[in-house]
Image (cartoon, rainbow, N blue to C red):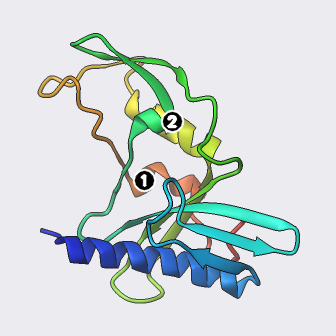
Amino acid sequence: MATGLSNQCTKQVGEHLVAAELARQGFLVATFAGNVPEFDIVAVKDSKRAVIQVKTAAKEAPNWLLNPRKFLKIGFDGEAQHLEGLQEKPPYDDIIYVFVKLGDVRGQDELYMLRWGELQEVVRGAYFHEGPVRRRPEKPGSFHFAVWPKQLTAYLVDPKSELPV
């Protein structure tokens, strides 16, 4: 079982990995070590600015937990959750999400990069995969949700190319 310390180390590795890749591309990068709600990195290059949220998964837990209510409007009637639509506005304009799956050693890491609207569609398709009503027999009111690498394969960044910021 992961400890608080190992979770923090995993998070730091992911954030610094993304920051290093952006710096390699010529961006000036500032990391915030979880002290700013909704984003971890701001990167600037010439007239470009990128606000980035990094989610990191260790090899032992190869998925990322998200709150689907940040992306979807979800109603609840006491027995079932209902898709009422999409959240209309991202937490920050043009926010980018980078999902990092750590490998065993350096160079085996995988990075998946999505814009807010793209992630919103992934969440909608995965959370309400059986239609606009979701029933959770054991805990009907739970919004626990994980995104898996197989759901993000279209957004895998080629390790030989730059991050498409």
Q: Is residue 130 left or right of residue 80?
A: right
Q: Residue at x 50, y 81 (%)?
A: 16
Q: Position of residue 49 (x, y in %)?
A: 76, 65
Q: Nearer the viewer, residue 158 or 32?
A: 32
Name, please, the residue furthest toward the front.
Answer: 35
Q: Position of residue 26 (x, y in %)?
A: 76, 84
Q: Position of residue 74 (x, y in %)?
A: 42, 22
SS type, badge 1: helix
- Dot 2 or dot 1, earlier in sequence: 2
Name, please, the residue furthest toward the right.
Answer: 47
Which disc number belongs to residue 109? none
Which disc number belongs to residue 150? 1
Q: Is residue 49 visible?
A: yes
Please state which amino acid type lies under the numbered disc 1.
Answer: Lys
Q: Residue at x 31, y 71 (%)?
A: 58
- Count up the numbered dots: 2
142 vs 43: above or below: above
Q: Quadrant of residue 158?
A: bottom right
How far apart marks 2 and 1 lie (CA) works out to 19 Å
Residue matched to label 2 = 71
Q: Quadrant of residue 42?
A: bottom right
Please state which amino acid type lies under the numbered disc 2.
Answer: Phe
Q: Is residue 160 visible?
A: no
93 vs 57: above or below: above
Q: Residue at x 56, y 29 (%)?
A: 87
Q: Position of residue 88 (x, y in %)?
A: 63, 29
60 vs 136: above or below: below
Q: Are marks 2 and 1 in contact (CB under 8 Å)?
A: no
Image quadrant for the N terminus? bottom left
Image quadrant for the C terminus? bottom right
